[in-house]
Image (spheres, helix red, strand yellow):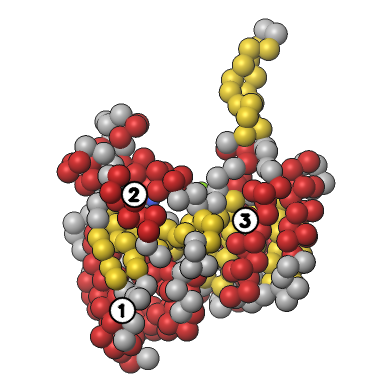
Amino acid sequence: TNPSLLILPGDGIGPEVMAEVRKIIDWFGAKRGITFDVSEDLVGGCAYDKHGTPLHDDTMAKAQEVDAVLLGAVGGPKYDALDFSIKPERGLLRLRKEMDLYSNLRPAQCFDALADFSSLKKDVVAGLDIMIVRELTSGVYFGEPRGIFEEGNERVGINTQRYTESEIDRVARSAFELAMKRGKKLCSMEKANVMESGILWREVVTEVGKDYPEVELSHMYADAGAMQLTRWPKQFDVIVTDNLFGDLLSDLAAMLTGSLGMLPSASLGAPMDNGRPKALYEPVHGSAPDIAGQGKANPCACILSFAMALRYSFDMGDEATRLEQAVNAVLAQGIRTADLLNEEGITPATTAEMGDAVVAALDAS
Ligand code: NAI
Ligand code: MG
């Protein structure tokens, strides 16, 4: 049977960038004989407009069945006044929660053609290709007790960093599996020097590592990790860390390389019957209402999210690389959307021109 994909374009620039991904999917069918069973549905504000809820139960059920979900973006000013329980973001949160997507993958990948665009020195970022795996469903953002309490004559704000062995075990496994598909090198980051949860984290990751003898495992304190990420990021391949440190380190790592319009992400859950993890792929950016409907959006983040799906859900690593190289080739030709240009006097490519150029580069590959 064909691999199945649920596409949820969403709001704002979501449908615009997803239209370019559809061209790529069609190309794989026509030119490589790789056919996906694609279904498309609503999420976010557009789902609210039609159904009065940002994610219909039928859509949720479909998401649970497919091999992978690819989402554009949700939200927009039109929906800002809605009650939180029916806001567009809730559609996305429901997907993440009910699919139990505990492993958030954020790559920091520098396309050669964009090495000049980074705020870091060119030799520090050129060729960079690392992956941060952030635990997404536990830790200090969820731990109890939490709240603002009266204590004596003042208030105290409390959050609790809490990790069970099984929560650490499953995200560690997900990171080791990724490392096996990449450079077989994993660095785990915590603060075992000052945190009990960090001590347990290090123990459990070390234990899981015994099941992956081919992967070279190292440990680093997260603050030192932040320094090393900016000093010499190419020393890393896969990094695994908790929810809070991952929030900071993945934003830091992502910006080593350039624009929001280039950043893909994935959120993975437990392996399904077919051995593949439950998976949701989406660009890091939002619905960009300031440029929506104008053909200005950079489709690369969404295209590269599809490349991640090829690699991590469909075991098509070579095809994923082919697609990433096509994106690099387009950038190298100087074809760029407005977000990737800082010189004036150059006419930016439109969303559709960028997508067409990637298809042409695939053809030439
Ligand atoms: P945003 O990511 O939508 O936009 C931030 C800035 O980056 C804007 O100036 C935008 O034009 C630019 N930008 C973003 N993606 C781009 C692309 N592909 N090509 C070129 N430029 C791009 O974040 P913002 O403005 O904070 O939020 C806008 C809406 O999106 C809000 O309703 C927010 O709730 C929602 N949002 C949704 C997310 C999601 O669906 N995962 C994530 C972040 C925000
Ligand atoms: Mg963040």
Which residue is located at x 34 percent, y 68 percent? 4
Q: At x 29% / y 57%, what residue is drawn?
A: 8
Picture quarter with the C terminus = bottom left
Residue 219 visible, this angle: no
Residue underneath mark 1: 35
> Looking at the picture, how far across and down is residue 18, in whole percent?
28, 64
x and y percent of residue 99 in the render?
A: 45, 50
Give the mark toward the camera: 1 or 3: 1
Q: Which of 118 and 91 is in front in this view?
A: 91
Task: Give the image quarter of residue 77.
Answer: top left
Location of mark 3 (residue) = 171
- Residue drawn 21% across and 37% down? 52
Count residues near mark 1 (Cα–Cα under 10 Å), then give few for <14, some for 14-19, many for 20+: some
Residue closer to the observer: 45 or 287 = 45
Q: SS class of the residue under badge 3?
A: helix
Dot 1 falls on a residue whose secondary structure is loop
> Which amino acid, by three-letter code, is at mark 3?
Val
- Distance Cα–Cα, label 3 vs label 2: 23 Å
What residue is disc 2 on? 60
